Amino acid sequence: MGIVFVTGANYLVENSTADYVTADISKLPNEKVGLVLGTSEKTDRGYTNYYFKYRIDAAEQLYKSGKVKYLIVSGYNSVHHYNEPEDMMNALIARGIPKDHIFQYFAGFRTLDSVIRAEKIFGQKSFIIISQKFHNQRAVYLARKNNIDAYGFNAKDVNNNSRLKIKIREYFARAKVFVDFALGIKPKFGGEKVMIP
């Protein structure tokens, strides 16, 4: 991908979502559902993954503030003994959030899948996305381009050795958003509809 294209894609994603992505909970509307984007509970070396921890912190804050009534936890689970949605659900239950207020989505292989399926599977046309700012910007952009009234609540960012690698990957992932739009890429997995009360 050309540097001009990649830079332009990043500018568009950040500029067009500036009014919808925040770490200030008071600036968010009340919504029925918060969507927690998946990541692993542990690093490859078995240490705490602070991207995971801080997303759980943010989800807890959002729920207990009354901004959302339910949480959808989305992520990857196709490998034996690796289940991001279940790990997130268990972490949230440990924080005192009722299990019947948490819904798992098991086909969140990509941010695109997680965002679009929140509408197609769970019937939500507006919701708050929970992840780090750099991820929320892309997720909210994807949602709004698909006529979903989404907002982003930014979890605390992580300052460690993995940060630069993740930011570089995100930089190119934003460019891929526009390639996907051009190619008409849709979420990979369907599923039965789930009713949220």
Image (cartoon, rainbow, N blue to C red):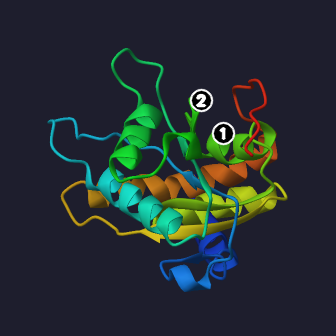
Q: Residue furthest top?
A: 80
Q: Residue at x 51, y 72 (%)?
A: 65
Quarter of image, res 149? bottom right
- Expressed as whole percent of the image width and height from the top left, the position of residue 77 reads 46, 25
* Relative height, residue 20 to residue 125 (above, below): below
Q: Position of residue 125 (x, y in %)?
A: 81, 55
Which mark is drawn over residue 39? none
Q: Is residue 94 left or right of residue 11?
A: left
The secondary element bearing badge 1 is classed as helix
In the displayed orientation, state which residue is furthest to the right. Answer: 147
Distance from label 2 to label 1 (Cα)?
7 Å
Pointer 2 with pointer 1, Cβ within 8 A: yes
> Is residue 118 shown above or below 24?
above
Q: Percent x, y for residue 38?
A: 47, 44
Crowdedness of circle 2 by 10 Å Cα count: few (<14), some, many (20+)? Answer: many
Amino acid marked by disc 1: Asp
Who comes first in sequence, dot 2 or dot 1? 2
Task: Tell me, yes or no, if residue 67 can be seen here.
Answer: yes
Q: At label 2, which amino acid type do we have?
A: Ala
Number of residue marks = 2
Q: Which residue is mark 1?
A: 113
SS at mark 2 in the image:
loop
Read off the residue under disc 2.
107
Answer with the quarter of the image where residue 121 lies: top right
Percent x, y of residue 177: 66, 52
Residue depicted at 50% across the width and 40% down the height = 99
